[in-house]
Amino acid sequence: MKSNRHRTYLMRAGLVAFVALFARSPIYLHGRGQSISTNGKELFEKRCSGCHAMDRDKEGPRLSGVYGREAAAVPSFEYSAALKASKLKWTDESLDRWLRDPEKLVPSNDMTFHVESADERHALIAYLKQNPGK
């Protein structure tokens, strides 16, 4: 009998330890909106910074403050005619669609890069939301 109790105790303790570790994991936290900014920042630096910066125009426009802004609204950047005419506002949905397939959302735009992974798109969008600009 003591052996069964001990085994049950160990199983419960193991389950509690697993739940405690999982609750702090990036996979769990991603869905809860935590730890995503670090991941989003790393993704931005790895996947986007070749063409974009947060605070200055490069090959692409500056992205600080992009969330909630109308598309093609940075005066110092020369956008494609298609993006200027798009009348888009950058929201969770429009950014997700844009990052998934820019050409499908706005045909004849100048951005050819896309992000296939939904998790990566969500992390990037969360990072952009945290950089409201000035």
Image: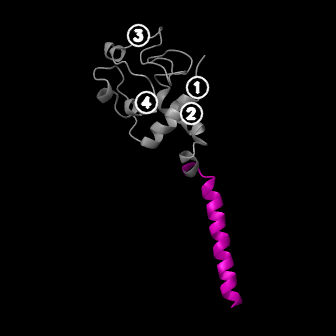
The image's mark for residue 131 is 1
Vertical order, 59 against 42 (above or below): above
The quadrant of the rendering that contains the N terminus is: bottom right
Q: On the image, numbered disc 3 is attached to which residue?
A: 78
Q: Looking at the image, which residue is at 47% across and 25% down? A: 50
Q: In whole angstroms, how far apart are the C-alphas of marks 4 and 1?
A: 14 Å
Residue type highlighted by circle 1: Asn
The answer for how far apart the CA atoms under marks 2 and 3 are is 25 Å
**Above or below, comparing residue 2 to residue 47 in the picture:** below
Residue located 48% across and 20% down the image? 69
Residue 113: in magenta span = no
Whether residue 32 can be seen here: yes
Quote the CA–CA distance across marks 3 and 1: 22 Å
Under tag 2, what secondary structure? helix
Position of 132 with respect to 117 (left or right) is right
Image marks 3 and 4: residues in contact by CB distance under 8 Å: no
| Element on which disc 1 rests | loop
Task: Decide: few, some or many residues near mark 3? Use Cα within 10 Å; few <14, some 14-19, many ≥20.
Answer: some
**What's the residue type where badge 3 is placed?**
Glu
Q: Which residues are magenta?
A: 1-27
Which of marks 2 and 1 precedes in the sequence?
Answer: 2
User: Which residue matches tag 2?
Assistant: 41
Q: CA distance from mark 1 to mark 2?
A: 10 Å
